[in-house]
Amino acid sequence: MDQVRVELGERSYSIHIGAGLLAKLPSLLPALSGKQVMVVTNTTIAPLYLEQVEEALSGFQLDHVILPDGEQYKTLGVLDQIFSRLLERRHNRTTTLIALGGGVIGDMTGFAAAAYQRGVDFVQIPTTLLSQVDSSVGGKTGVNHPLGKNMIGAFHQPRVVIADLATLLTLPDRELSAGLAEIIKYGLIWDAEFFEWLEHCMDRLVARDIDALAHAVRRSCEIKAEVVGKDERESSLRAILNLGHTFGHAIETAQGYGRWLHGEAVGAGMVMATELSIREGMLPESMRERVTDLSIRAGLPVKGPADMDEAIYRKLMAVDKKVLDDKIRLVLLEKLGKAVVTTNFDPTNFSATLRACT
Ligand code: NAD
Ligand code: GLY
């Protein structure tokens, strides 16, 4: 088993990574504030893992709430089901919420924990590759609004993250690919050597080799922990974690939540960010083929939806959280392993990028 620490002073916590961790839950949990626990999960994950988790937590006053499955249910309306269940079952301020699922469940449970009785503890048990390498770490929580993705939320750090690699064996192929997009992101923005390792090992990851997954999840979490430890609230550095996301959020919003997976939209968005970095003269031409090839081997789209034109991208990218003084801010690549956040790019290159990647 691997352990990565997120260093945030009194809010520091561990990320445990390994196969078979669900059975070891009690030994991995920190001392909880009280005896009450509410597991939040969804209709797909409950039949697979809820019983195992509840058995491991049998010493607690245990309740659960099972939400509908899908990005389209990551809303304020559905969030209310968690609050209602907590109130019906008389959970108090010492309760702990447990997010058992992917990024949708993790983001919603974290936001519910941030708001319930002005803040209670929560634990992340991420069961998708994307949530193990990204969304369960760093404390961003929230829900979508019809006018923009993740627009309503709060920063609220979990007490611990428990990433059981064995849960990845039941994940649909498309979801595995979506997680691989975020893993490729870490190589591009932070660690050229890790990107090269991915070029060597992508086939093992796609085949769900546990040792390869363990390395990829650990290195991704180390990078995310380092970035979040330096800039928890995204005043500067943390924005680099959004490589490809501004393009990707536009794709998700235009297509309707749930049609393109978040990781797929980010995958196409990273190809666009790479293309724009090359056109801006920041990145060598050879990176176009390297990023595209690796994305294809990961099972990711390398072009945006054919029905989206530049005007749609511009309109939707203008509501991104990174927009500053009405200027679209993008994460671009200065070189492999180094990202910059900038509003300073040539509009002609931006238009040409969208044409090349659609
Ligand atoms: P998801 O939560 O929708 O899960 C994907 C699908 O896999 C769902 O149908 C889910 O029920 C199913 N599933 C989950 N675990 C499974 C398992 N072990 N076996 C079989 N099926 C399983 O999607 P996701 O990709 O995990 O997360 C995407 C969400 O995360 C988006 O809402 C995105 O905005 C958010 N996100 C948040 C952050 C953050 O920092 N908070 C970062 C990245 C993404
Ligand atoms: N996924 C981007 C972040 O956590 O900041």
Image (spheres, rainbow, N blue to C red):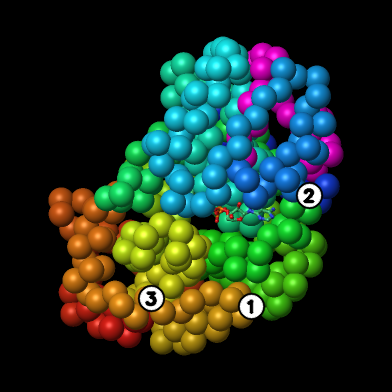
Mark 2 C-beta closer than 8 Å to ligand 1:
no
Query: Which type of secondary structure does the marked residue at label 3 adopt?
Result: loop
Q: Which amino acid type is shown beneath numbered disc 2?
A: Gly
Q: Nearer the viewer, residue 17 or 40?
A: 40
Which tag, 1 or 2, sits closer to the chain's start?
2
115 lies left or right of 208: left
Q: Is residue 86 above or below residue 101?
A: above
Mark 3 Cα-neighbour bin, 10 Å: few <14, some 14–19, many ≥20: many
Tell me the residue at 27%/50% (across/down). Answer: 147
Residue behind mark 3: 304
Residue type at the position of mark 1: Glu
Relative horizontal placement of residue 123, taking residue 185 as reference (left or right) = right
Image spot of residue 199 (x, y percent)? 63, 78
> Which mark sits nearer the N-terminus, 3 or 1?
1
Dot label at residue 199: 1
Instruction: Estimate the x, y position of residue 329 in percent, counting from the top left.
Output: 27, 59
Q: Residue at x 59, y 76 (%)?
A: 299
* Image coordinates for residue 185, horizontal then vertical, percent: 51, 64
